[in-house]
Amino acid sequence: MRFLAKVALALAAVAVATTIVVTVAAQEKQPAPQQQQTDKRFQVQVTPEMVRHSRITETLYFVGLGYSLLMLFGILATGLSRRMRDTAVRATKRPFVQAMLYVSLFVLVTTLLELPLSYYAGFVVPHQFDLSAQSLAGWLGDEAKGLALSLVLSAVVGALALLGIRKVKRWWLALWLGSIPLIVLLVVVQPIILDPIFNKFEPLKDEQLRRDLLDLASRAGIEGSRVSQVNKSKQTKTMNAYVNGVGPTNRIVMWDTLLAKMNHDEIIAVMGHEMGHYVMKHIWKGLAFSLVVSFFVFFFAQRFSERGIAKWGAKWGVENAADPAAVPWLLLVATIIGFFLSPVISGYSRSNEHDADMFSLELTHLNESMATAFVKLAEDSKQDPNPPAIIEFWRYSHPAISKRIAFVLGYKPWEHGEPNRMWKTGK
């Protein structure tokens, strides 16, 4: 396994170097540290339960990764992948259909193997910490819907990927180019086709809040915006809001739990943050960033996967990278690469989230409301506001809550006659 060790070290070096650049760039935007906050309104009440919940979720992240890698390797080493491939070959002589059948079997097998961990992380833990009131039947129903979607999408996309590997020598480039329209398509259709499978989306019911949000959107430079609410309370007691979709499917969405637990100004501050994502085109920039990252993932995936198959493929019954039985190995390599790139992806996301916080403050001047909103978000989700530095560095898509609170309470350039940095009036 000396080859895999070299791969891991090389990827780690690239990830660390790139992350340092991203982290330094993000830190340059940060203001000087604020004095210790003494107002209890802006202090997250950290409880042992909150810390325990955070440590469990952090542990599950790494345990889940290790379990996935062992599962993929086990499917190869036991010959299960080869037998599933042989079953597909006996069923049809058409390579494309064989690939679809194999991928479908693979999705079913991996879903079954991952079910105990998924059940614990997705059902037991949220109920243990009173973060969900969803019934087991409801949870299983959502899982079944997700499995059905995965079977359809994975079978088609997986078969197309194997076709590209079979037909093109530099298949990493073919797969990368093919992923571009696919990713854009998924982002476009997600709000109108995929999301409604799990939840009900409808226009915001609170007319006064809706008018205020539309006025805020107009000031932000967003015309004809769509603000929706979604019944996430059927699955969780936590709060969230987000922007998704592009072009005609773009919309700003609030969970009904957020509407129930935050006051008017807190909602305005939170939605100013989401509008910042829209105005600063973070969805499009995120797509571009993901394509840059995936370029390197595909490039290294071909090199490492083909070397691995040349060395161990005979033991696994895998002929080449285009063999459907190679899918677990391809995914294992991609997962390892993705793991070492996690800090880069997380660092980029944290930078965008910080910019969106800044945009909201410049647009609304609701510093205290934004701070109390963050306090509620942390306490309501039982999220440690001061996670271990390595955890935040490696996997946090948002800055730690304690850092966000300190920033929003101190960022007031308008009081010193300084220009806005994110929201440009009259833009």
Image: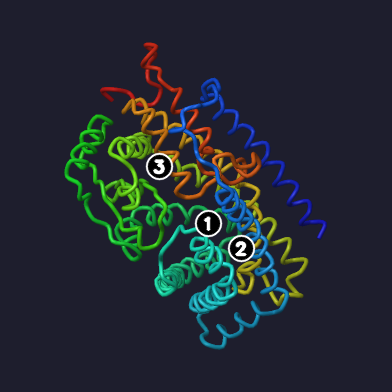
Give the image quarter of residue 66.
Answer: bottom right
Hey, what amino acid is under mark 1?
A: Ala
Which of the two labelled residues, at mark 2 and mark 3, occupies the earlier sequence position? 3
**Residue 162 horizontal side relative to residue 65, left or right:** left
The one nearer the camera, 412 or 426, is 412
Secondary structure of the residue carrying numbered label 2: helix
Task: Say which residue appears at 43% left-offset and 69% top-offset.
Answer: 139
Q: What is the spatial separation of the Cα atoms under label 1 and label 3, in whole angstroms?
A: 22 Å
Could you say which disc has been placed on residue 210 in the image?
Answer: none
Give the image quarter of residue 81.
Answer: bottom right
Q: Which residue is mark 3?
A: 284
Residue 53 rendering spot, x and y as whole percentages: 57, 53
The C terminus lies in quadrant: top left
Which of the two labelled residues, at mark 2 and mark 1, occupies the earlier sequence position? 1
Q: What is the spatial separation of the Cα atoms under label 2 and label 1, in whole angstroms?
A: 17 Å
Residue 418 rendering spot, x and y as whole percentages: 39, 13
The one nearer the camera, 388 or 311, is 388
Hey, what amino acid is under mark 3?
A: Trp
| Camera-side mark, 1 or 3 | 3
Q: Where 218 sits versus 319, above or below? A: above
Q: Which residue is mark 1?
A: 174
Label 3 crowding class (10 Å Cα cut-off): few <14, some 14-19, many 20+?
Answer: some
Q: Are marks 2 and 3 in contact (CB under 8 Å)?
A: no
Could you say which disc has been placed on residue 331 in the image?
Answer: 2
Label 2 crowding class (10 Å Cα cut-off): few <14, some 14-19, many 20+?
Answer: some
